[in-house]
Amino acid sequence: MSSDPHERARQLTTLSDEVSAAERTWLAAHVESCSSCRGFVESAGETIRSLRAIPITVSGSLLAATRMRVRQRALELQRRQERLQTIWVCAAAVTFCTAFNTALLWRGFAWLSQRLSHSTPLFGLVFIALCLAPAIGAGIILLARGSHSAGQNGSLELGGF
Amino acid sequence: MNATACYFANAMADENTEIARGLQRRDPDLLDSLIEKYQHRLLRYLVHLTGRRDLAEDLFQETWVRVLERGGQYDGRHEFSTWLFAIARNLTLDYLRRKQPSSLDTLSDDDDATPFDIPATGSPSALELTLQRERSEQISGGMEQLPAKYREALALRLHEGMSLEEMAAVTGVPISTVKSRIYRGLSALQAWLKGGR
């Protein structure tokens, strides 16, 4: 707060209800004795009243448009949430089935190795190869498609010239 | 604190908690009622902050969409209006940074646009209406001349009746700065109205 009594009085005027009782008393006494600050207080009061009297209202169309936009967005978010939930449920089901099938296959291969009297490590290797086969196959296909797309893009770029 | 004040403080806290729960659920009915309740205050703040009615209306819609999206972040410990105004302010600043990177004060004034609505109220005489309109235009003109930070301080304090603490929370500046902005804004507005334009 300023040390200049006039400026201090004007600052306190703008803070209205947030000044202490002591400051309020000091302000009242100062305004009583200082015509310049009294003028400021009256003028500030008038300005504040005028400012508060400016009517800014929301039109019906803006209100309706806002509500509609918010409801649409809420619907979008809800749908997204539902899709996400479906994906999570599917991922959990796939994980569970994979774990279950892997255990089953492993037991099956162990049984087969006993029946055919072959060494367990050999069947272990076959088992791993079988497990990895889909992933390796998918990788090869994706790589082939990627190089094919790159070739196409390259020819398109060249064609642009 | 007396019993009545205590009762109202608890009621407010309960209301804020209810709002927080509803926003976490993205309850569309709650949002409707919030839009209804805070519509005029929010638009008034945005008009004063941006100085442009059309931009304020765009940001008004954006603010409510953001309230829906980020509703989970409102914890109900503060007044909902403080959180709402802070969101509106951040959106405005983001928009202005994108459009005019220099500062909030370089907003171009749209002279052709009508700055404020003057709806028909009661049944004042033609002379009273004219005088009221003139006074409103004068004040609006004065507000448009002020730097945005002073416009914002005056709008929050004098229009919305926010406490200094709430203003500091919305604007993210210390209370001493808030006080200074109110004083300087009001002084500048008065000077402008007295013909120092």
Image (cartoon, coloured by chain):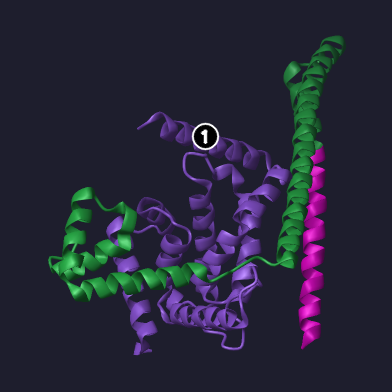
Q: Residue at x 81, y 31 (%)?
A: A130
Q: In the rendered image, what is the letter of the chain coloured green?
A: A
- Along the line of sight, the residue nearer the viewer: B60 or A43: A43
Q: In the rendered image, what is the letter of the chain coloured purple?
A: B
**Residue A76 position in % (x across, y down):** 77, 51
**Residue A133 position in % (x across, y down):** 81, 37
Q: Is residue B170 left or right of residue B84?
A: left
Q: Which residues are magenta?
A: A134-161
Q: Is residue A55 left or right of residue A127?
A: left
The residue pinned by badge 1 equals: B11
Q: Residue at x 87, y 10 (%)?
A: A115
- Along the line of sight, the residue nearer the viewer: B43 or A144: B43
Task: From this view, report whether residue A106 is shown above or below residue B143.
Answer: above
Q: Is residue B44 left or right of residue A102?
A: left
**Residue B101 position in % (x across, y down):** 47, 77
Q: What is the chain identity of the residue bearing mark 1?
A: B
Quadrant location of the C terminus of chain B?
A: bottom left
Task: From this view, report whether residue B13 is shown above or below residue B31.
Answer: above
